[in-house]
């Protein structure tokens, strides 16, 4: 599960930023990571959605943030309700490559240069 979250980190971050009005900072950042685990379970595992949601919400107790159970539940349910739209929007964005933006920019420059050299050599 941990490897999967790390592998899809940019996608999960992108989704959370779309689902939440403002980012979580400081000590609440732990809840951000917990929501990532819940989203990963909903997107990529065969865990039944109701179980993934319930276990993620219960995780708030484990990280000593029981007052944020409602927030976690709300974000994950909001994702369930708008998953198709959000995933279509994600797939149309550069974030779909699951690489950091600085790397994408470098690759685009490199490919552009290679294409230009190839065209000139024709």
Image: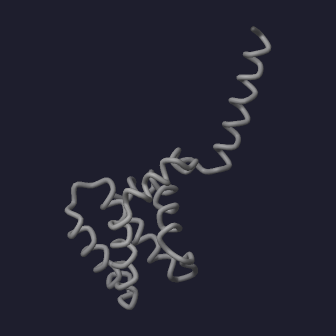
**Above or below, comparing residue 72 to residue 82 in the picture:** below
Q: Where is residue 15 in the image (x, y as percent from the top left)?
A: 47, 63
Location of residue 70 (image quadrant):
bottom left
Percent across and percent down for residue 103 are 65, 44
In the image, 33 versus 43, the foreground residue is 43
Q: Whole-percent x and y of residue 7?
A: 45, 51
- Residue with the most extreme bottom position: 67
Residue at the (28%, 80%) spot, across then down: 58
Q: In the rendered image of this protein, does residue 45 appear above or below residue 111?
A: below
Colouring chosen for the image of the structure: one colour
Residue drawn 66% across and 37% down? 107
| Location of residue 51 by image quarter | bottom left
Q: Which residue is drawn at 50% across and 81% down?
A: 28
Left-right relation of 9 to 106 = left
In front: 100, or 112? 112
Q: Where is residue 97 in the image (x, y as percent from the top left)?
A: 53, 44
Q: Quadrant of the N terminus?
A: bottom left
Picture residue at 33% right of the left edge, 78% below the top: 73
Picture mark count: 0
Name the quarter where the C terminus is drawn.
top right
């Amino acid at each position: 599960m941990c490897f999967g979250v790390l592998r899809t980190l940019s996608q999960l971050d992108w989704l959370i930023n779309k689902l939440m009005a403002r980012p979580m900072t400081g000590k609440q950042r732990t809840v951000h990571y917990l929501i990532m685990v819940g989203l990963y379970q909903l997107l990529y595992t065969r865990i039944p959605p109701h179980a993934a949601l319930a276990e993620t919400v219960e995780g708030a107790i484990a990280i000593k943030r029981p007052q944020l159970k409602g927030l976690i539940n709300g974000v994950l349910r909001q994702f369930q309700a708008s998953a198709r739209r959000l995933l279509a929007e994600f797939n149309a964005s550069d974030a779909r490559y699951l690489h950091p933006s600085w790397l994408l920019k470098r690759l685009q420059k490199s490919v552009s240069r290679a294409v230009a050299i190839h065209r000139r050599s024709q």
